């Protein structure tokens, strides 16, 4: 379990992380979602003690990371910034990390095979592709068979097969009761991997809830309705308390009333319906909607 | 929050960070980089090679030298002339032992595995220091013995058992190790290999030259306290009045190193990486 309490990081004039409080529970995959520059990486660096909070604190398994007697067994971390000496082989890199905790050589071999870099394990890391480097980083994170995994943008540089692999791995590890905290700026990725979301924008937490409730909260629950009696239906629905927008092609976009209620109202007034379809917001849309005011950089939204 | 979840908590394997583990890790790091092996080899070859070269030079010039010049030539000092170049190789390696971690980002992995941080610096200093000391002691003795074989052609050679000679030869190894560890401290403080190497060269080679431009009564007071002069005092068999005694020279070097490593440790602990 990771607990952040009023976590703040100020770099000169810029507040990268602004009084962030959150709890990452074991037994599920928690997504850490936010646009680039929202403070995700800085927060993760503070969790593993690489950056010191300006204010507040963060604990893993009840202790500050620096106080953990066996950090690699408690936390495995894959951070965004490069963290491997390019002149060393992958196997020696992992061995050097393992030796600090007395982790046996057999475990080094095990994680190498687990992430599928067996063929290049004895080659120097400088020649690795982005994907290979990412797999090595994941191997290092898994080395201590840790209770908590912190992965900053783990799918970066991975091929589709690798992405599927890491998704399954994270779900499997969460199923064993481990704490999994994964950051991403890709919302579609999070919707497939995460059970729970912590969403940040401009250094602040803007949502901390399950993926399902995040989507439903953000969704305006629009319902698309078509009818040959457009004007009559529109009047009935407006009287019933809905907001109705009529598209040029005759489609009514109804908000404020659920689909069953719309159907009932139409039936009560003897109006025919040709289409009645509730619209489900995607995680992407939910994110855009909820963080619109918090986004550091506004992208062009379609 | 308390752990009252229905799902059983995952228990990770046991095994804490221990200093012997950090030492093993630093040994793996040191031996697994080609640059380390090549630089150490270069230092050994420079030490032995230049000792031989200068000895041959003396032997070939011997018949043309006057009696005064012959008297000022010290066979131990001649054999240890390679220190001048070897110190650069060892110093650069000392910087790179930590500077390479900063430039590649490896330091983040190292400090995530050992978040108390200080053991990483002490582990590096101990492993690199011991490896360098042993290697340089062997190389210094080899340089000395090989040079004496050459010098014996003109009967100017000496032996390790002669007064102050063993201390001077091992003093060379100690000074070279000192340069390496001083480089390690500079690399940690500056976090940039190029800046640290420049500073190291400045302290070892440039500052003594600048000291020469001082008024002579100032220079006499300042020059002998410099690390380079203390090093020279340590590896000269015969003490002169201008230099520090070997014991005092060793003490000064120890003080310089302690202060620089303490600064390095304090900054390593405090800074974000």
Image (cartoon, coloured by chain):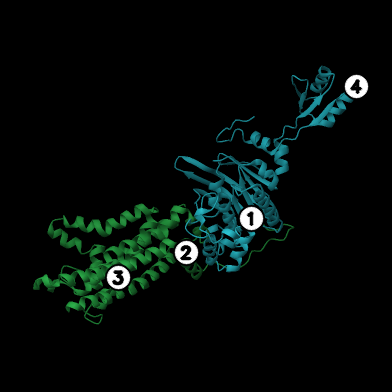
Instruction: State how far apart marks 1 and 4 are (Cα).
Output: 57 Å
Position above or below: A218 against B125 = above
Q: Both on one chain, marks 3 and 4? A: no
Q: Secondary structure at mark 4?
A: loop
1 vs 3, front mark: 3
Q: Residue A236, percent across and down? A: 83, 21
Question: Chain B appears in which tint?
Answer: green
Instruction: State how far apart marks 1 and 3 are (Cα).
Output: 58 Å
Is residue A266 visible to the viewer in this orientation of the structure? yes
Residue at image point 12% right, 59% down: B216
- Is B17 positioned to the left or the right of B243 in the image? right
What residue is shown with label 4? A270
What residue is shown with label 1? A1
Q: Both on one chain, marks 1 and 4? A: yes
What residue is shown with label 3? B48
* Letter of the chain shown cyan in the rendering: A
Near-viewer residue (B268 or B178): B178
Q: Residue B81, percent across and down? A: 24, 68
Q: Residue B209, percent across and down? A: 20, 57
Q: Both on one chain, marks 2 and 4? A: no
Callouts 1 and 3 close, C-beta under 8 Å = no
Residue at image point 62% right, 49% down: A182
What residue is shown with label 2? B32
Q: Chain of mark 2?
A: B
Q: Both on one chain, marks 2 and 3? A: yes
Residue at image point 15% right, 62% down: B220
Is residue B156 visible to the viewer in this orientation of the structure? no
Q: Residues within 10 Å of mark 4 (few under 14, many from 20)?
A: few
Q: Counting residues from the N terminus, which is met first, the one under dot 2 or under dot 3?
A: 2
């Amino acid at each position: 379990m990771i607990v952040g309490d009023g976590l703040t990081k100020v770099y000169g004039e810029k507040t990268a992380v602004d009084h962030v409080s959150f709890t990452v529970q074991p037994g599920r995959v928690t997504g850490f979602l936010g646009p680039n520059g929202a403070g995700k990486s800085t927060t993760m660096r503070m969790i593993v003690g690489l950056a010191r909070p300006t204010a507040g604190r963060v604990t893993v398994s009840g202790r500050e990371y620096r106080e953990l007697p066996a950090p690699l067994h408690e936390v495995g971390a894959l951070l965004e910034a490069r963290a491997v000496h390019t002149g060393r082989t992958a196997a020696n890199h992992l061995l050097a990390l393992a030796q600090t905790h007395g982790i046996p050589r057999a475990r080094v071999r095990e994680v190498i095979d687990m992430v599928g870099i067996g063929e290049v394990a004895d080659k120097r890391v400088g020649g690795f592709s982005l994907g290979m480097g990412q797999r090595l980083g994941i191997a290092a994170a898994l080395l201590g068979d840790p209770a908590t995994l912190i992965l900053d943008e783990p799918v970066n540089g991975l091929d589709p097969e690798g992405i599927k692999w890491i998704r399954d791995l994270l779900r499997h590890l969460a199923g064993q009761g481990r704490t999994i905290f994964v950051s991403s700026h890709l919302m579609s990725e999070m919707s497939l991997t995460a059970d729970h979301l912590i969403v940040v924008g401009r250094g602040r937490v803007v949502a901390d809830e399950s993926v399902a409730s995040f989507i439903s909260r953000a969704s305006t629950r629009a319902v698309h309705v078509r009818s040959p009696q457009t004007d009559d239906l529109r009047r009935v629905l407006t009287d019933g308390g809905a907001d109705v927008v009529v598209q040029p092609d005759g489609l009514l976009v109804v908000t404020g009333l659920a689909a069953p209620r719309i159907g009932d109202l139409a039936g009560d007034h003897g109006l025919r319906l040709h289409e009645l379809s509730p619209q489900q917001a995607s995680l992407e849309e939910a994110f855009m909607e909820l963080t619109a005011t918090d986004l550091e950089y506004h992208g062009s939204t379609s | 929050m308390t752990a009252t979840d229905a799902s059983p908590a995952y228990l990770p394997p046991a095994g804490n960070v221990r200093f012997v583990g950090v030492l093993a890790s630093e040994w793996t790091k040191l031996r697994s980089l080609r640059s380390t092996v090549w630089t150490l080899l270069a230092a050994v070859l420079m030490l032995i090679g230049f000792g031989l070269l200068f000895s041959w030079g003396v032997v070939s010039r011997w018949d043309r030298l006057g009696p005064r010049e012959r008297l000022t030539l010290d066979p131990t000092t001649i054999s240890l002339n390679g220190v001048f170049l070897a110190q650069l190789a060892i110093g650069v390696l000392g910087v790179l032992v930590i500077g390479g971690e900063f430039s590649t980002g490896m330091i983040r992995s190292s400090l995530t595995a050992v978040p108390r941080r200080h053991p990483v610096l002490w582990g590096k200093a101990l492993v690199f220091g011991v490896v360098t000391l042993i290697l340089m002691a062997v190389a210094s003795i080899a340089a000395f013995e090989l040079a004496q074989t050459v010098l014996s052609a003109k009967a100017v050679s000496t032996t390790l058992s002669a007064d102050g000679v063993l201390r001077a030869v091992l003093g060379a190894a100690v000074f070279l190790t000192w340069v390496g560890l001083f480089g390690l401290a500079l690399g940690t403080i500056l976090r940039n290999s190029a800046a640290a190497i420049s500073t190291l060269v400045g302290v070892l080679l440039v500052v003594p030259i600048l000291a020469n431009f001082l008024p002579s009564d100032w220079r006499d007071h300042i020059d002998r306290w410099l690390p380079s002069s203390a090093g020279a005092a340590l590896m000269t068999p015969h003490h002169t009045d201008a230099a520090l005694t070997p014991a005092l020279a060793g003490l000064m070097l120890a003080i310089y190193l302690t202060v620089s490593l303490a600064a390095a440790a304090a900054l390593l602990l405090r800074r974000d990486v």
